Amino acid sequence: MAPNLSSSTFERRSPPIKLAELSSLSAADSAAINAVLARLKNLPGALLPILHGVQDALGYVPKDAVPVIAKSLNLSRAEVHGVISFYHWYRTEKPGEHVLHLCRAEACQAVGGRALEAHVKTTLGIDFHETTADGRYTLEPAYCLGNCAVGPSLMIDGALKGRVTADRFDRLTGVTA
Amino acid sequence: MSALKEAVTIYVPRDSTAISLGADEVAAAITAEAARIGLDIKLIRNSSRGMFWLEPLVEVATDAGRIGYGPVQPEDVASLFAAGLTHGARHPLSLDLVEEIPYIKNQERLTFARAGITDPVSLADYRAHDGYNGLTNALAMEPAAIIAAVTDSGLRGRGGAAFPAGIKWKTVAGAEGAQKYIVCNGDEGDSGTFADRMVCEGDPFVLIEGMTIAGVAVGATRGYIYLRCEYPYGERALNEAIKAAYAANWLGANIQGSGKHFDLEVRMGAGAYICGEETSLLESLEGKRGMVRFKPPLPAIKGLFGCPTVINNVITLASVPIILDKGAEHYKNFGVGRSRGTLPVQLAGNIKHGGLVEKAFGVSLRDLLYTFGGGALSGRPIRTVQVGGPLGAYIPDSQFDLPLDYEAYAKVNNMVGHGGITVFDDTVDMAEQARFSMEFCATESCGKCTPCRIGSTRGMEVIDRLVAGDQPVKQEALLRDLCDTMLAGSLCALGGMAPFPVLSALNHFPEDFQKSSQQQTPRVRVAS
Ligand SMILES: Cc1cc2nc3c(=O)[nH]c(=O)nc-3n(C[C@H](O)[C@H](O)[C@H](O)COP(=O)(O)O)c2cc1C
Ligand code: SF4
Ligand code: FES
């Protein structure tokens, strides 16, 4: 299977410091990654669709997926890593059970977005790009969700919410500070 | 009429703004209530009319026309049925005939002719409302004549740069290349804009049709829609529509027996504002980091995968079908000066009647903000509006009478851009807004140019010191200097225009930068 192939290449190129990490990809994750690759790798410009596919399947793009993806597309690991780090959407850490995208952009600022941001951070006890200690929520910033006439806006696992007051946020998440 | 009692048709939008306010729950409540009282209804998930303060806006088809109710919440549903919603009876949420609501009635809807009326993913509905008339005409024309029609219509790119669409198409048509591409820019990163989203979710066939016409005109057989990943609802609607278009031979090989071929695919962005810039977008489509390319070569000559490429905004492409259907003259007869046709303006932020207003060019901001918008949502005075997204200037009341026109705006360093108008009331802190513009530029810079990458971070620091009253005269001079460097030393408009909101805030609202010398205002400051 592909992960084995790639781990052998990986070992050849660099000393075994990363061996522990390599084995961290579970059999199920490997299978999911390989399914995405099999489906998308022949598209022209396949890398972004593949990264989306992996993130949709696993919730993130595990570091150990990088050599597998690189090998399948004939790219260097640095190239794949460079793309992942360029785009805000991709994450390399496992997220919480739910991912919140909170809009920080101007139209939401104009209707209390900054105060909502403060409320969300205190209530969850985390900053952007962090996950709550109980693993329930990961908080990410968004720069506009296209919901600018009815802000402040928020996306919960891809579901858009408008006119989000502090109260509505508490009701949506069931979290209180 | 027929003696057979037909099921009453009820509409609940599937637009994501409507959904963000509870449209899915309302649709479910309507289905449940109808079942409970044993009533046969036909529920259609239409698109939104763009009157977002009325969403979820429920409509019912009656002999007199479509009657609206809104904004409806699930708990209103039982009382709506009890009052006689199914025959358009009155209720406290009644809006009467939707098409008579002044907000809609006073618009000139060309690109958004079907918005809120049709089922967005029904090809039959699209066809019944003039859909594919434009492509049908185009298929019977010489490619050069299609391009001439687009040129004659005066249509300019709606993504921001306002470049004449016909001229771009002509360049691609004349470029050498076995493979050519049509790329739709659906990155819509500007805060305060949602017109592209509304097309993708609310009338996806019009975009598909516009891209197909472009393909036939320039000899491109393949198209990509690059859609921002913040638009999952749009992605689903587009893919449903593309599937239906293939099934009915409006996409694929030998379209409607014409011998023309056009394939179309949606590709998702990944949360990078810079990927709205056309060359960055092409890099991204090729599977790379979205680094801005040097021009020349123009994408029209060497674009996607090095091939001649038309890249146009969603609204530009979605405006093409009506031009080919009703003729260049019809489109051109709207507008002023060199700004022809209509612009779908988006009223956003602190505004009572937020939504989509498609008007011929020439309308004033004041008209948009007060006649259509109804003033600030908070009921307080409007202090400023930012037009054209995060790189657009903050405009003070003294310029609200400026006509919406590319040239008139450019003359005073404002920008029409993609037509987003973000409204702020008098509680806005302009120093905070200026700082955010710099912060945004720093976050979203592709990193190629130093003034953009580093200058923006310096800009934040200088604004912080200026506001803190730390040698303010020196800091202001520094800030202006920095803005000059960014204006002059940036490869693209991210670094090259981020100074506009900053300088406009500084020039029009200098008092907000001198807070430390005055009494501290009790504004909530959020450290991030
Ligand atoms: C920083 C930056 C961001 C941009 N973002 C967008 C965008 O989100 N959508 C868009 O259509 N054009 C955007 N543009 C403009 C595009 O570069 C390009 O002009 C446009 O896609 C051409 O299509 P049009 O002629 O139909 O407007 C952006 C430009 C810059 C410099
Ligand atoms: S101005 Fe900024 S975003 Fe544009 S090319 Fe330069 S560094 Fe990249
Ligand atoms: S600015 Fe927040 S959704 Fe557009």
Image (cartoon, rainbow, N blue to C red):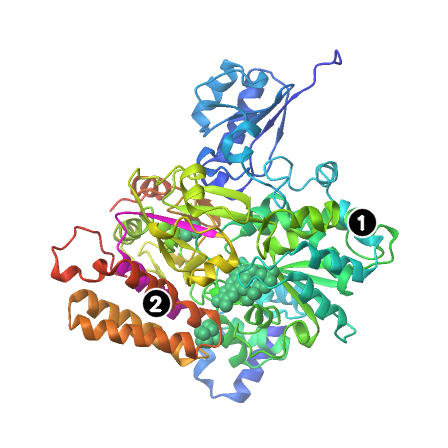
- Graded by Cα atoms within 10 Å as few (under 14), some (14 to 19) or many (20 or more), the crowding at tag 2 reads many
For the point 74% across and 40% down, the residue is B127
Q: Inspect the image, locate mark 2, and give the three-letter code of the amino acid beneath it.
A: Met
Q: Please tell me whether mark 1 or mark 2 is closer to you in this view.
A: 1
Spot occupied by residue B103 in the image (x, y as percentages of width and height): 50, 35
Residue position for label 1: B137
Mark number displayed over residue B438: 2
Spot occupied by residue B40 in the image (x, y as percentages of width and height): 64, 19
The image quadrant that residue B47 belongs to is top right
Query: Could one spot residue B13 in this view of the protein?
Result: yes
For the point 34% across and 43% down, the residue is A169
Q: Inspect the image, locate mark 1, and give the three-letter code of the amino acid beneath it.
A: Asn
Name the secondary structure under disc 2: helix
- The correct choice, above or below, for B2 with respect to B110 in the image is above
Spot occupied by residue A118 in the image (x, y as percentages of width and height): 27, 53
Q: Please indicate whether residue B498 sits to the left or right of residue B207 in the image.
A: left
Spot occupied by residue B193 in the image (x, y as percentages of width and height): 48, 52
Give the residues drawn in magenta, as a range: B420-446
Q: Please indicate whether residue A26 sits to the left or right of residue B481 in the image.
A: right
- The correct choice, above or below, for B428 with respect to A4 in the image is above
Magenta highlight on residue B441: yes
Name the secondary structure under disc 1: helix
Magenta highlight on residue B445: yes
